[in-house]
Amino acid sequence: MNRFGWILVKDKFWDAYETNRLIEEFQKQDIDVQLVDPNTVDIFVNKDNKKSIVVNGESSDLPNFVFPRTGSGTTYYIKAVIRHFERLGVPIINSSDAIDNVKDKLYSHQILAESNLDIPNTMLLKHPIDIGFVEAYIGFPAIVKTISGSYGRGVFLAENKKQFKQLLTMAELTKPKYNIIVQEFIKDTWGKDLRVLVVNNKVVGCMMRQAQDDDFRANITRGGQGFPYEVNEQIEWLSVESSKALNLDISGVDLLFDNGGYKICEVNSNPGFEGMEKFTGKNIAGEIVSFIKLKVGKQNV
């Protein structure tokens, strides 16, 4: 097998379940892949050398595709690396713009709202913070989120005005000019939600996540359990349309239960799928690899 593509992933995630499963499925389809830490790639821009790139100080041939697995951890430098590949004509699975669209949770909600998709009422806090204004337009309980984050980190519940003030005080001690958003709390979804995996605008897996304690968050990484969940018309429509609106090839869409229907909580460009494969038996890695093979083109395999 000739070297074919790169999975762009920080070296601390090289042993992650998802990384190993992707490698396994690439090998099954006779596609060789290399793990590359984006921070080892050097960007050198000129008008002549367009067939190679520098990695760890050595020139390397361009891969046939690059699959970034950096998600909310995509720094400015990593984004610049992805854009450099794009300018060199290398197919990217989830473009730099698509990753940008979802890294900023407020911006992604603006795009989803523009597309007429159901989301919780959302507000960006500005300084000085007017708590009365938040109470009038969002109310309490309220969900407080950092602009960027994943796996349930940076997500808090303020059950009343007092707790909200305490959260703000803690945030100010950490970073005086922090950026956070506040969302309405959807009571029907306490301790449970849906995770939907979308590949090439097709739902390939859906599970309900449920907290095992009294946590309002249901993330598997926080100890939640997963259960296969039947995809209905609304789940499919919300998941596929949100992926389209955000221009994502591959996405993880989190849906909240709301009065017999659903609202979009958030969308991820680098979804974990260990829980999805474990609890549903779906071959998510295989679906991803088959799509990449289709997107890049059989002539390059």
Image (tube, rainbow, N blue to C red):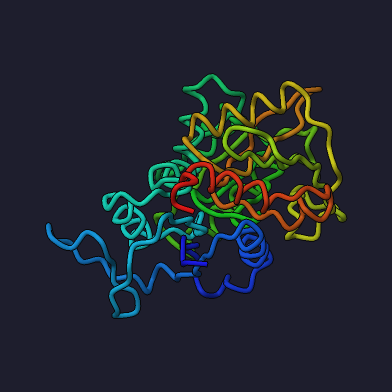
Residue 57 locus on image (x, y percent): 29, 80
Residue drawn at x 17%, y 61% is 45
The residue positioned farthest toward the left in the image shown: 47
Give the quarter of the image for residue 78: bottom left
From the viewer's perspective, is 298 left or right of 54? right
Would residue 300 be visible to someone looking at this image? yes
Q: On screen, 40 above or below 6?
A: below
Would residue 104 be visible to someone looking at this image? no
From the viewer's perspective, is 181 left or right of 210? left
Residue drawn at x 64%, y 33% is 202
Residue drawn at x 50%, y 22% is 115
Give the quarter of the image for residue 254: top right
From the viewer's perspective, is 206 left or right of 197? right
From the viewer's perspective, is 109 left or right of 284? left
Residue drawn at x 86%, y 55% is 213
Residue 173 locus on image (x, y percent): 49, 64
Residue 280 locus on image (x, y percent): 83, 47
User: Which residue is nearer to you in this view: 296 or 82?
Assistant: 296
Q: On screen, 252 above or below 237?
A: below
Give the quarter of the image for residue 140: top right
Residue 129 locus on image (x, y percent): 46, 43
The residue positioned farthest toward the bottom in the image shown: 57
User: Which residue is nearer to you in this view: 272 or 76?
Assistant: 272
User: Which residue is nearer to you in this view: 35 or 297?
Assistant: 297
